[in-house]
Amino acid sequence: MKLVQLAKQVADSQKRGLEMDKITLSNPELTVNQAYEIQKLSINETITDKNKFIGWKMGLTSKAKQQQVGVKEAIYGRLTSSMELQKPFLKVGELIHPRVEPEFAFLFKEELKGTNITAKDVWRAVECVFLALEVIDSRYKNFSFTLTDVVADNASSAKILLSNQAYSPYHTDWAQTEVKLYQNGEIRKKGRGEAVLDHPIHSIVELVKMIDREGLSIQSGMIVLVGGITDAVSVQADDEIVADYGDLGKLSLHVTS
Ligand code: 0L1
Ligand code: MG
């Protein structure tokens, strides 16, 4: 089994928006560490002057999602500039079976690295926070996978939308902030920031420790999506998605064909 070949297969499926069989079906011996290697190789293959590595995402950060997938750990994925929507429109034709979930995104002004960092270190390194919508789109049939499969598939990353407004990290209780997710005017999901590993800051501490295994860090200028505040909703053409963050405002996404 060649990790490079598997990485090419995953990258191709991501690029063309085509579903694939779970890679663990034909490679049952693959480990999670090897899956992170496949993730790195497949995303590195897409990096160019026009598609830069812009940060990280954490996934499976809520108890509900971990139970859904049958795992006890969070995972991380890589974000690139082509994933960022510059306008609040999502073309579903390019995707397989997209789902949307509300998140927070933290922007960093200082590098964060190592296995000993604390929440205090993270607060010092944060520049600001954005409201965010993440579009996930597993490349596996029926959105069904093992931990190894989903790690190799870059934690189902597809697109991200950030709010125009940036927020000071210090004046909001991010754990107690409530988010309501509406689809075509109907409330579909509701949750608080504490769904993300009890507090979104813990997600970043965890991320820094996890990426240290690859000798990597959160670099100055990078963003981090901390994890879903509610469950994700499946979307289709003509849907209007609104995440209502209360006093912080709303973030909307228009879904087109
Ligand atoms: O962002 C997420 O929490 C998704 C992680 C991968 C699992 C999934 O696709 O639901
Ligand atoms: Mg997410």
Image (spheres, rainbow, N blue to C red):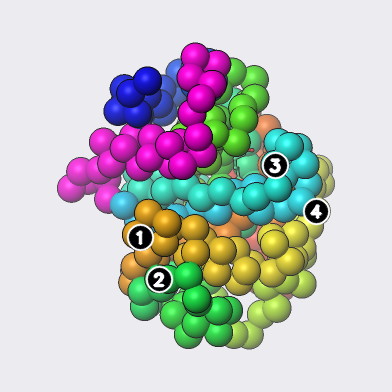
Q: Disc 1, disc 2: CB below 8 Å?
A: yes
Which residue carries the number 2 mark? 113
Q: Is residue 3 above or below residue 62?
A: above
Q: Is residue 238 visible?
A: no
Magenta span of residues: 25-52
Examine the image and state in which quarter residue 145 appears: top right
The answer to whether the residues at label 2 and label 3 have Cβ atoms under 8 Å apart is no
User: Whole-Å distance between the Cαs marked 4 and 1?
Assistant: 34 Å
**Could you tell me which secondary element the residue under label 1 belongs to?**
loop
Label 2, label 3: how far apart the Cα atoms are: 26 Å
Mark 2 in CB contact with mark 4 (< 8 angstroms): no
| Disc 4 secondary structure class | strand
- First of labels 4, 3 by sequence position: 3
Quarter of the render that holds ligand 1: top right
| Inter-mark Cα distance, 3 to 1 | 24 Å
Q: What amino acid is found at the position of numbered circle 1 in the picture?
A: Leu
Q: Which residue is mark 3?
A: 71
Q: Is mark 3 within 8 Å of ligand 1?
A: no
